[in-house]
Amino acid sequence: MIEWVTVSFGARPVPRPVATPLVWGAAFGGALSLVTLLNALAGPGQPGLALTALSLLAALSGLCARFTAAPGTAVLCWLILNGFAIPPAGTLTWAGHRDAFWLACLCTAALIGTAMARCVQARAAYRRISTTTSEPADGPGDF
Protein backbone atom coordinates (compact mmCIF):
# COMPACT_ATOMS: atom_id res chain seq x y z
CA MET A 1 0.00 0.00 0.00
CA ILE A 2 1.30 3.45 -0.91
CA GLU A 3 0.59 6.32 1.44
CA TRP A 4 1.08 9.86 0.20
CA VAL A 5 2.60 12.20 2.77
CA THR A 6 3.32 15.86 2.34
CA VAL A 7 6.90 16.77 3.01
CA SER A 8 7.74 20.25 4.18
CA PHE A 9 11.00 21.56 5.45
CA GLY A 10 10.51 23.92 8.36
CA ALA A 11 7.42 25.84 9.33
CA ARG A 12 6.33 28.82 7.32
CA PRO A 13 6.32 31.95 9.44
CA VAL A 14 3.22 33.93 10.27
CA PRO A 15 2.93 36.87 7.84
CA ARG A 16 4.37 40.12 9.10
CA PRO A 17 1.97 43.03 9.57
CA VAL A 18 2.22 46.02 7.26
CA ALA A 19 4.28 48.97 8.51
CA THR A 20 2.25 51.33 10.69
CA PRO A 21 2.82 54.49 8.58
CA LEU A 22 1.47 52.66 5.52
CA VAL A 23 -1.62 51.57 7.45
CA TRP A 24 -2.17 55.11 8.67
CA GLY A 25 -1.77 56.52 5.17
CA ALA A 26 -4.24 54.02 3.77
CA ALA A 27 -6.69 54.70 6.61
CA PHE A 28 -6.45 58.47 6.10
CA GLY A 29 -6.86 58.26 2.33
CA GLY A 30 -9.61 55.68 2.60
CA ALA A 31 -11.49 57.69 5.22
CA LEU A 32 -11.27 60.86 3.17
CA SER A 33 -12.49 59.04 0.06
CA LEU A 34 -15.26 57.27 1.94
CA VAL A 35 -16.60 60.42 3.61
CA THR A 36 -16.44 62.29 0.31
CA LEU A 37 -18.44 59.51 -1.34
CA LEU A 38 -20.97 59.40 1.50
CA ASN A 39 -21.40 63.18 1.40
CA ALA A 40 -22.00 63.02 -2.34
CA LEU A 41 -24.50 60.15 -2.13
CA ALA A 42 -26.32 60.66 1.17
CA GLY A 43 -25.51 64.30 1.81
CA PRO A 44 -23.61 65.86 4.69
CA GLY A 45 -24.94 65.62 8.20
CA GLN A 46 -25.16 61.82 8.37
CA PRO A 47 -22.70 61.09 11.20
CA GLY A 48 -24.23 57.69 12.06
CA LEU A 49 -23.78 56.39 8.54
CA ALA A 50 -20.29 57.87 8.33
CA LEU A 51 -19.33 56.37 11.71
CA THR A 52 -20.51 52.93 10.59
CA ALA A 53 -18.62 53.14 7.31
CA LEU A 54 -15.45 54.43 8.98
CA SER A 55 -15.66 51.72 11.65
CA LEU A 56 -15.72 49.10 8.90
CA LEU A 57 -12.76 50.82 7.25
CA ALA A 58 -10.88 50.83 10.58
CA ALA A 59 -11.59 47.11 11.04
CA LEU A 60 -10.39 46.38 7.50
CA SER A 61 -7.27 48.46 8.12
CA GLY A 62 -6.67 46.45 11.28
CA LEU A 63 -6.56 43.19 9.32
CA CYS A 64 -3.06 43.92 8.08
CA ALA A 65 -1.76 46.11 10.92
CA ARG A 66 -0.07 45.81 14.29
CA PHE A 67 -2.01 46.43 17.50
CA THR A 68 -0.01 49.62 18.01
CA ALA A 69 -1.51 51.09 14.82
CA ALA A 70 -5.09 50.95 16.14
CA PRO A 71 -5.13 54.20 18.15
CA GLY A 72 -3.60 56.18 15.29
CA THR A 73 -6.02 54.64 12.80
CA ALA A 74 -8.92 55.59 15.07
CA VAL A 75 -7.70 59.18 15.46
CA LEU A 76 -7.19 59.64 11.71
CA CYS A 77 -10.66 58.28 10.95
CA TRP A 78 -12.13 60.48 13.69
CA LEU A 79 -10.43 63.58 12.25
CA ILE A 80 -12.07 62.96 8.89
CA LEU A 81 -15.41 62.09 10.54
CA ASN A 82 -15.38 65.20 12.72
CA GLY A 83 -14.00 67.53 10.08
CA PHE A 84 -15.96 66.53 7.01
CA ALA A 85 -18.94 64.32 7.90
CA ILE A 86 -20.74 66.76 10.18
CA PRO A 87 -21.55 70.39 9.38
CA PRO A 88 -19.83 72.81 9.28
CA ALA A 89 -17.39 70.99 7.02
CA GLY A 90 -13.73 71.70 7.61
CA THR A 91 -14.14 72.65 11.27
CA LEU A 92 -12.88 70.39 14.03
CA THR A 93 -14.92 70.44 17.22
CA TRP A 94 -14.98 68.46 20.43
CA ALA A 95 -18.44 67.57 21.71
CA GLY A 96 -17.39 65.67 24.83
CA HIS A 97 -19.27 62.39 25.12
CA ARG A 98 -20.14 62.15 21.42
CA ASP A 99 -16.56 62.42 20.21
CA ALA A 100 -15.24 60.17 22.96
CA PHE A 101 -17.83 57.57 21.91
CA TRP A 102 -16.82 57.94 18.25
CA LEU A 103 -13.15 57.50 19.11
CA ALA A 104 -13.95 54.45 21.23
CA CYS A 105 -16.01 52.91 18.39
CA LEU A 106 -13.26 53.49 15.82
CA CYS A 107 -10.48 52.20 18.11
CA THR A 108 -12.53 49.13 19.05
CA ALA A 109 -13.18 48.39 15.39
CA ALA A 110 -9.48 48.65 14.55
CA LEU A 111 -8.56 46.42 17.49
CA ILE A 112 -11.20 43.84 16.57
CA GLY A 113 -9.91 43.74 13.00
CA THR A 114 -6.36 43.24 14.20
CA ALA A 115 -7.35 40.59 16.74
CA MET A 116 -9.34 38.68 14.13
CA ALA A 117 -6.39 38.71 11.74
CA ARG A 118 -4.00 37.52 14.45
CA CYS A 119 -6.34 34.68 15.47
CA VAL A 120 -6.77 33.51 11.88
CA GLN A 121 -3.01 33.67 11.27
CA ALA A 122 -2.19 31.87 14.52
CA ARG A 123 -4.69 29.13 13.73
CA ALA A 124 -3.23 28.70 10.25
CA ALA A 125 0.29 28.58 11.67
CA TYR A 126 -0.78 26.00 14.25
CA ARG A 127 -2.31 23.84 11.54
CA ARG A 128 0.86 24.07 9.47
CA ILE A 129 3.05 23.05 12.40
CA SER A 130 0.86 20.31 13.85
CA THR A 131 1.48 16.86 12.53
CA THR A 132 -1.44 15.21 10.87
CA THR A 133 -1.60 11.79 9.38
CA SER A 134 -4.19 11.03 6.85
CA GLU A 135 -5.54 7.59 6.28
CA PRO A 136 -5.58 6.48 2.67
CA ALA A 137 -9.02 6.41 1.11
CA ASP A 138 -10.39 3.04 0.08
CA GLY A 139 -11.72 3.33 -3.38
CA PRO A 140 -11.03 2.68 -7.02
CA GLY A 141 -7.54 3.51 -8.10
CA ASP A 142 -5.87 2.77 -4.74
CA PHE A 143 -2.99 0.35 -4.86
Image: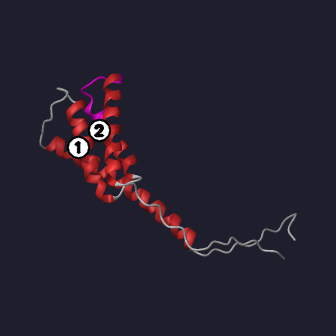
Residue beneath disc 2: 51
> Who's the residue at 20% across and 33% down the image?
83
- Residue at the spot of label 1: 102
Left or right of 54, for residue 7? right
In the displayed structure, 36 sits above or below 68; it is above
Q: Is residue 55 visible?
A: no
Q: How many marks?
A: 2
Indicate the secondary structure of the residue bearing disc 1.
helix
Say what amino acid the circle numbered 2 marks.
Leu
Instruction: Based on the picture, tell me whether residue 35 belongs to the magenta stretch.
Output: no
Of residues 11 and 116, the one nearer the viewer is 11
| Numbered badge on residue 47 | none
Q: Residue at x 63, y 71 (%)?
A: 8
How busy is the neighbourhood of tag 1: few (under 14 within 10 Å), some, or many (20 plus)?
many
Quadrant in the picture for the C terminus: bottom right
Name the residue located 57 percent from the left edge and 69 percent from the top edge.
128
| Colour scheme of the picture | secondary structure
The quadrant where residue 50 appears: top left
Tell me if label 2 and label 1 are in contact, CB under 8 Å: yes
Separation of disc 2 and disc 1 at Cα? 7 Å
Element marked by disc 2: helix
- Image location (x, y in percent) of residue 39: 30, 25
